[in-house]
Image: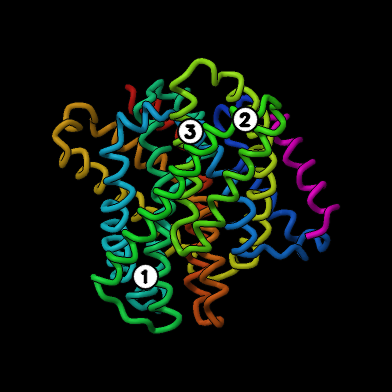
């Protein structure tokens, strides 16, 4: 991707964000994806190659760090039980149930193996509410709902990668699966990434006191966001969770002292601009890349997969709120429905699709097309439906 193409894509993102400042009903990322699909028909943009490595190592650390850093540590502690459960056991149950249902329904539409169905389910489990959180808060007026949605999305990204890696290995390399190996690797990768992130976040909160130059503090935050991610990947633990927990730890440490306020103001100014720039590029690139896989004859099944994924997610969340005694009275079925609907798919799902494409030799094209279609359907329909659904459930 050339520098001229990057500048033009940033200009398009700037224009869209400027035209729709409030994003009251239609989040800009949805428009960016749709516009990206349109740009794919222009030779100048269709030549852009989007890779899994580009999304994973360039875009995700910035998005994850910004979301985690701005996520209230107090809200995380308050909702830690349900967030952790949904992002670990909940996501595993979702993959198993959703995969089984996709396989059972696939017969009349496509030829799909059980492992292939599980891979699709693992791709559709990570949530990406970056485009709807502000709408969710404004429409519902509930910090509890938005906190659960956002907190779950931050942690389940790391879980989904571990699950996907096992299933994709079984699909493309015929690797064997044992429960013990999966649990062991999951704990090492997840806990190792979280521990590394906490250590990085704590060290940065102390290191900023060695300089009074705000520009240097911003430089240090970039090092933390990308450094924790890449170091974690280097030692084979979760880079996603390392970056997420470094941001959460930093927010926690800064929230303990009033004297940290000017540090936060400086970082907020930089990362808010960086987030908009990254989101503009990312969602336009998602649209450009997805267009290559959308010409297939199983769109009806893709809509069925999307509908089933919503139903399974709602069942898991309802079951979770009933499982935790403290949540039975705090969470109504209406709130569970809104949390379920707000868990739309996005950048992490696209990364997993591109990772599968890189690992396969063309024999997973139908899986890739179905997953891409389901992700786009989720992104558009769920984004558009957040505000109307909130108002309807409120009645």
Q: Which residue is mark 3?
A: 133
Residue 40: image location, x then y, percent: 73, 59
Badge 2 crowding class, 10 Å Cα cut-off, few under 14, some 14 to 19, many 20 or more, is few
**Residue beneath the point at 30% across and 46% down:** 86
**Local secondary structure at mark 3:** helix
Give, as a single range, the part of the protein colored magenta: 1-20
Is residue 2 within the magenta segment? yes
Instruction: Give x and y (percent) for residue 365.
Output: 53, 75
For residue 167: magenta? no
- Which residue does the numbered mark 2 point to in the structure image? 210
Colour scheme in use: rainbow
Q: Residue 78 placed where, x, y %? A: 30, 29
Q: Secondary structure at mark 2?
A: helix
Mark seen at residue 227: none
Instruction: State whether residue 384 appears in this view.
Output: no
The reply to whether discs 3 and 1 touch (Cβ–Cβ < 8 Å) is no
Residue furthest out toward the front: 210
């Amino acid at each position: 991707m050339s520098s001229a193409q990057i500048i033009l894509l940033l200009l398009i993102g700037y224009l869209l964000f400027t035209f729709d400042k409030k994003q009251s009903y239609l989040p800009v990322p949805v428009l960016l994806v749709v516009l990206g699909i349109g740009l794919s028909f222009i030779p100048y943009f269709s030549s852009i190659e989007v890779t899994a490595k580009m999304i994973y190592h360039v875009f995700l650390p910035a998005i994850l760090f910004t979301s985690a850093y701005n996520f209230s540590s107090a809200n995380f502690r308050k909702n830690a039980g349900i967030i952790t459960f949904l992002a670990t056991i909940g996501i595993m149950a979702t993959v198993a149930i959703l995969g089984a249902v996709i396989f059972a329904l696939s017969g009349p539409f496509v030829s799909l193996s059980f492992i292939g169905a599980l891979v699709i389910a693992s791709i559709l489990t990570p949530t990406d509410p970056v485009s709807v959180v502000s709408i969710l808060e404004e429409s519902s007026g509930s910090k509890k709902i938005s906190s659960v949605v956002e907190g779950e999305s931050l942690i389940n990204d790391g879980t989904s990668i571990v699950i996907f890696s096992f299933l994709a290995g079984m699909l493309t390399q015929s690797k064997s699966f044992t429960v013990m190996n999966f649990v062991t690797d999951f704990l090492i990768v997840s806990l190792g990434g979280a521990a590394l992130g906490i250590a990085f976040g704590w060290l940065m909160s102390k290191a900023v006191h060695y300089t009074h130059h705000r520009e240097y503090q911003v430089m240090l935050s970039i090092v933390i966001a990308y450094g924790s991610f890449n170091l974690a990947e280097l030692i084979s633990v979760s880079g996603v969770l390392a970056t997420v927990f470094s941001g959460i730890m930093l927010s926690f440490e800064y929230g303990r002292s009033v004297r940290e306020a000017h540090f936060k103001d400086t970082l907020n100014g930089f990362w808010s601009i960086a987030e908009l720039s990254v989101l503009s590029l990312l969602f336009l690139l998602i649209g450009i890349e997805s267009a290559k896989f959308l010409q297939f004859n199983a769109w009806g099944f893709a809509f069925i997969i999307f509908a089933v994924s919503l139903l399974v997610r709602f069942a898991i969340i309802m079951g979770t709120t009933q499982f935790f005694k403290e949540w039975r009275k705090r969470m109504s079925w209406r709130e569970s429905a809104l949390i379920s609907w707000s868990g739309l798919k996005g950048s992490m799902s696209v990364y997993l699709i591109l990772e599968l494409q890189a690992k396969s030799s063309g024999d997973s094209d139908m899986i890739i097309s179905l997953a891409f279609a389901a992700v786009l359907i989720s992104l558009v329909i769920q984004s558009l439906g957040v505000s109307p659904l909130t108002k309807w459930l409120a009645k």
